[in-house]
Amino acid sequence: MADATAPAGGGSAFPATIRTARPADLDGIMVIERANFPDDAWSRETMASELVNPNGRYLVALDGHEVIAYAGLRAAGDQADVQTIAVRADRRRGGIGRALLLELLDEARRRGAESVFLEVRADNAPAQTLYAGLGFIAFTIRSGYYPGGVDAVVMQKVLS
């Protein structure tokens, strides 16, 4: 998908539009970032640099003009990494996260990636279920990776 908008989630309970993130979206992204990752949120400066990094692609899901979710990918060579994905708490379970992730997978293919990696908290069963449902396989654990000593499950999806 280019910069054009598209409906998210195919019949999602929460209508949204997905498009490429812009620097003007940073305030909305940071509200969600801080709410979802209170112990390890990225700084505003880090997120701002990610939005314009040529090796990446960041997307936002909008309800009207309001950012309700975002996701980012970094690609290099034959590998891509999902850098982050977050949905505002009151908009979860409506297909928006899935729609964002599908767009990131398409972007990874366009960039020539053969596989996509991500890390997910070991205590985040809903996210792990989403990723597994899209073909990601858990292949290793990073012990104590997240604040509070929570392990990270490293997952991979081989692209066809």
Image (cartoon, rainbow, N blue to C red):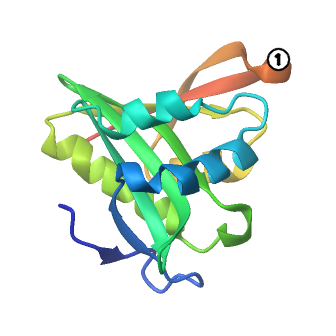
Front residue of 31 and 108: 31
Horizontal side of 129 relative to 40 (left or right) equals left
Give the image quarter of residue 57.
top left
Horizontal side of 52 relative to 59 (left or right) equals left
The answer to whether any part of residue 155 appears in the image is no
| Furthest residue in direction top, as rendered | 143
Residue 73 placement (x, y as % from top left)? 36, 38
Q: Is mark 1 on a helix, strand or loop?
A: helix
Q: Name the residue under label 1.
A: 149
Horizontal side of 112 relative to 65 (left or right) equals left
- The three-letter amino acid code for the residue at tag 1 is Gly
Quarter of the image for the N terminus: give it: bottom left
Front residue of 8 and 45: 45
Horizontal side of 141 relative to 38 (left or right) equals left
Residue depicted at 26% across the width and 41% down the height: 159
Residue 138 placement (x, y as % from top left)? 55, 31
Q: In the rendered image of this protein, does residue 82 appear above or below residue 98?
A: above
Residue depicted at 46% across the width and 41% down the height: 136
Residue depicted at 37% across the width and 57% down the height: 102
Front residue of 43 and 141: 43
How would you rate the neighbour count of disc 1 (Cα within 10 Å): few for under 14, some for 14-19, many for 20 or more? Answer: few
